[in-house]
Amino acid sequence: MKLEASARQTAQAVPNRIESWAKVTGQALYADDIEWPNMAYGCLVRSPQAHARILGVDLAAARSMPGVLAAIEGPGSSAPYGIMPSNQDEHALAVDKVTYLGEPVAAIAAESFRQAYAAARAVRVEYEALSPVLKAGAPEKSLPQVREESETGNLHKAVDLEFGDVATGLQTASYRREDRLFYQGNNHVALEPHAVTAFWQPNGQIVVQSATQVPHYVQRSLAKALGVPEHLVRVMVPTLGGGFGGKSELFPHEVAAALLSRRCGRPVRITLSREDVFYTHRGRHPVAMKVETGFDAESRIQAMSFESVLDGGAYGSYGIASTYYTGALQPTTYRMGAYRFHGERWYTTKPPCGPKRGHGTTQPRALLEVHMDRVARDLGLDPIELRRKNLQPAYSVTVNQLDITTSGLAACLDAVERMSSWKERRGRLPYGQGLGFACSSYLSGAGLPIYWNPLPHSGVRIAVNRDGGVHVACGLTDIGQGANTVLAVLAAKALGVCLERVQLTTQDTATTPVDLGSYSSRVTMMAGNALLAAAQHMLSLLTEAAAHHWEVPAEAVARDGEDFCVDGGGQRAGWTEVVRWAEAELGPLAASGGYTPAPPRGRHKGSGVGPSPAYSFSACVAEVAVDDLDGRVQVKRLYVAHDPGTPLNPQSVEGQIRGGAVMGLGEALMEAQAFNPDGRHRGPHLLGYRIPTILDVPEIEVAVVGEPDPNGPMGAKEAGQGPLNPVIPAVLNAVREAIGVDLSETPLTPDRVLRALERRRREEAR
């Protein structure tokens, strides 16, 4: 496999991101920037109770206040909805009871935001307090039921999967070990808070401009919630200021804005505050996990048993998929003879959890990689060597029936080992300093859509105008990862034209073919393949037109730059001229393409979670310094290698790797969506919820490795989520080497480090 020390080496060949100028000059318009004539402003009334029955909502005082145009409450406001077909359990405004602090119970629209906010404070809601449910897996009899319609109490979902004979594999193992880890939940903290403007127009169409990652799914869910046909809902996405999974389903403020617009006959905007964002949440699940692994005499994995218990919060959200994902991808990195997974997701009276960058795979990867390090220590092996012994090979099938194509994982191990001088430095640093290693994998798009259907996951339509311009329409959403640039670059390369000819229309359900959205690192793989199919169709039209004009077979027509020519002959014509020949013959030129992944290999229940057209692979070495007086952990340097197949935009790939590493750093050291005993968020603001600043970011060395993947567009795989996953366990493992203490809970806050050191001192004293 080809190894590059840094993606910078090839970045010069790729243009800047096509939206860069608009963003750096302030011309880019985000959801809260767009002004509509006669626009009203909305405000949600949120519950101050974590769990309570609603005895009454009094809107009279609010309706009489200056500027108020509409006021609505829960009953009858909308039909239940949910992103997963099996969990249609949400209403825009709470009906009968609230199940987390901050749940919306009413909504106000007024001439100005100040007036709407004042009226929201005047709404009187009478509650009957119920006991909060704050612990996943708590005994059923001691706690009230969160979702009263649930037939399994507070247990939302239980999953049991087994591949091979795990019991025998563990019993006959030469060595076996069990480890546990609690991974704290955390929030996306996208730079842009959620915002929406909805306008219920006189012709019955609802136009929604929203900060969402999934316009198609919002269109589909909003139509259900409002009881209108899907074709009457148009969802448009302005420039998006980050999502990381936090904007990938329908939210109450989007439904409320549409309902208020219908009441007052004006466009209505609702913008969430940062505190509102923490209550809306849908972030990473807190997960308690246990893994037990048996190894043979050659230190190879015979059998593995993995268990996870997820705290899901008050609603289903993506929770069923999240539960399966906590067990799905362990075998993609390591070959094993048998594998068992048991997962549970529980309802609690907290803001609902959902997908965050690395959806459902980040937490189990943290435990698995910490576990592998502890195994290596017990067996007297170098941690990287233990991984090498157990790598899942390229072009293989995992024990749980996932198809691996290309794998750059071995090259990732080699890269971080070399960059960090691992062999020379590991175990030789002074007390308080350490190196830690971890590796991981991720999807290049989920193999099945959220609602199962035979339709393409992504569609692209290409139109070529008689001026030679190329117009590409696709419903993909650029959430800051550079998706628009990738699509434009692919179009230019596939059609053989300069990038300046290409114009895009994206992020609009009324004017583009369906793309399922930006989640599971699917955009490059799926929109890219759809684009290539459309481009191939368009090229065939143009080639046939040139062949007809020159009276030669189509096989004789070749390309020389943008020009068409007869192979071996003297005829030559420019791109625009051939376009005009084709339009004269065929009429306006348009071609479309779609992409649907191959069906999953597995046929067991839950087999739809985990399959992907291709998997990316990553590895990380973290270098840390730990102060045993105050417990502070400082990450001094990160070495990260990632396998994205062929990097279509090396500059963006490196940016994604660095961004993922920094987000992983925050989850490892400081981020926690934590709650008081009454269900109140401990810090729903950026003073109480810490994220890394520029002062916390260490030097990050990046390597891009791998080879073209046969399933990817021009060989590309994902780069947006995979690089995050190995960072957290690499830091955990580095801290263990630095101070000789195992930590089994994230984040590694100073108090946790000090408590672990104190426990060790007491044990040594005994």
Image (cartoon, helix red, strand yellow):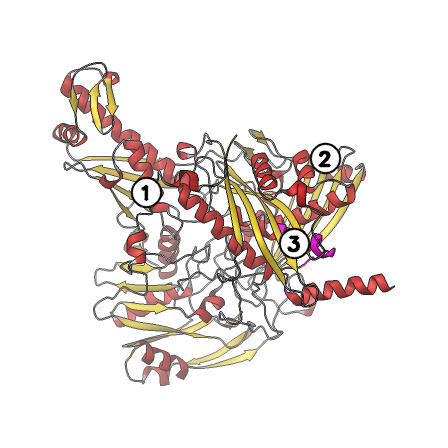
Check residue 485 for magenta coloring: no
Q: CA–CA distance between discs 3 and 2? A: 23 Å
Q: Secondary structure at mark 3?
A: helix
The quarter of the rendered structure image containing the C terminus is bottom right
In the displayed structure image, the side of residue 706 where residue 307 appears, left or right? right
**Mark before the other along the chain sequence, 1 or 3:** 1
**Mark before the other along the chain sequence, 3 or 2:** 2
In the displayed structure image, the side of residue 661 where residue 65 appears, left or right? left
Residue type, numbered disc 2: Arg
Question: What residue is drawn where x is 79% and y is 33%?
Answer: 297
Residue 302 on image: x %, y %: 73, 36
Task: Residue 235: tell me if it is visible.
Answer: yes
| In the foreground, 540 or 495 | 495
Q: Which residue is mark 1?
A: 15
Q: Secondary structure at mark 1?
A: loop
Q: Which residue is mark 3?
A: 732
- Assess whether mark 2 and mark 3 are in contact (beta carbons under 8 angstroms): no
| In the foreground, 40 or 277 | 277
Q: What segment is highlighted magenta in the picture?
A: 730-749
Circle nearer the viewer, 2 or 1: 1
Q: CA–CA distance between discs 1 and 3? A: 38 Å
From this view, report whether residue 380 is shown above or below residue 577.
below
